[in-house]
Image (spheres, helix red, strand yellow):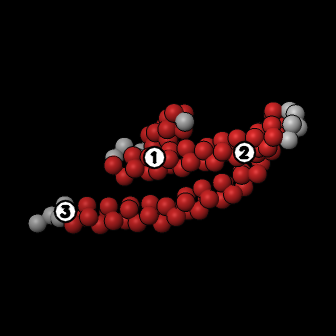
Amino acid sequence: MPVAVLLAFMSFRMMGISANIMSLAGVAIAFSELVDASIVVVEQTHKKLETVAKDRAYARLREVVIDAIKEVAGPTFFALLVIAVSFLAGADAAGEAGRCSAAGVHQDR
């Protein structure tokens, strides 16, 4: 997860975005969504492992984990996609609002 934050700040630097309160809030939201998706995967894996242990079906551990990930991968991906798309409009409006407020403050008289 620290790698994700590092990559975010590297892309900020490449795009010329400063680390202001809005961009840090976006990183915090993205980080929390990453943690949430990880929790969903861990819970599903734990559920699958309990089922395997209860049935005394000794499947390979790797196969059980991969099956659990496959079950939640689609819904998790689309949930994150919906969240990401919902922020696209706000990102555009924030840039426009920033330009409008900057123009109003720095008027030449």
Q: Position of residue 99 (x, y in %)?
A: 32, 62
Dot 1 and dot 3 residues touching (CB under 8 Å): no
Instruction: Assess disc 3: are there few (<14), some (14-19) or many (≥20) residues with their C-alpha within 10 Å of its C-alpha.
Output: few
Q: Where is residue 19 in the image (x, y as percent from the top left)?
A: 37, 43
Residue type for callout 3: Val
To which residue does mark 1 refer? 27
The C terminus lies in which quarter of the figure? bottom left
Measured in 3D between alpha carbons, the distance from the residue under mark 1 to the one under mark 2, in whole angstroms, is 30 Å
Report the mark closest to the observer, 1 or 3.
1
Q: Residue at x 37, y 52 (%)?
A: 22
Outermost residue to the left: 109
Report the mark closest to the observer, 2 or 3.
2
Name the secondary structure under disc 3.
helix
Closer to the camera in the image, 96 or 58: 58
Is tag 1's residue or tag 2's residue first in the polypeptide sequence? 1
Report the mark closest to the observer, 1 or 2.
2
Q: Where is residue 43 in the image (x, y as percent from the top left)?
A: 66, 45
To which residue does mark 2 refer? 47
Residue type for callout 2: Lys
Closer to the camera in the image, 74 or 54: 54
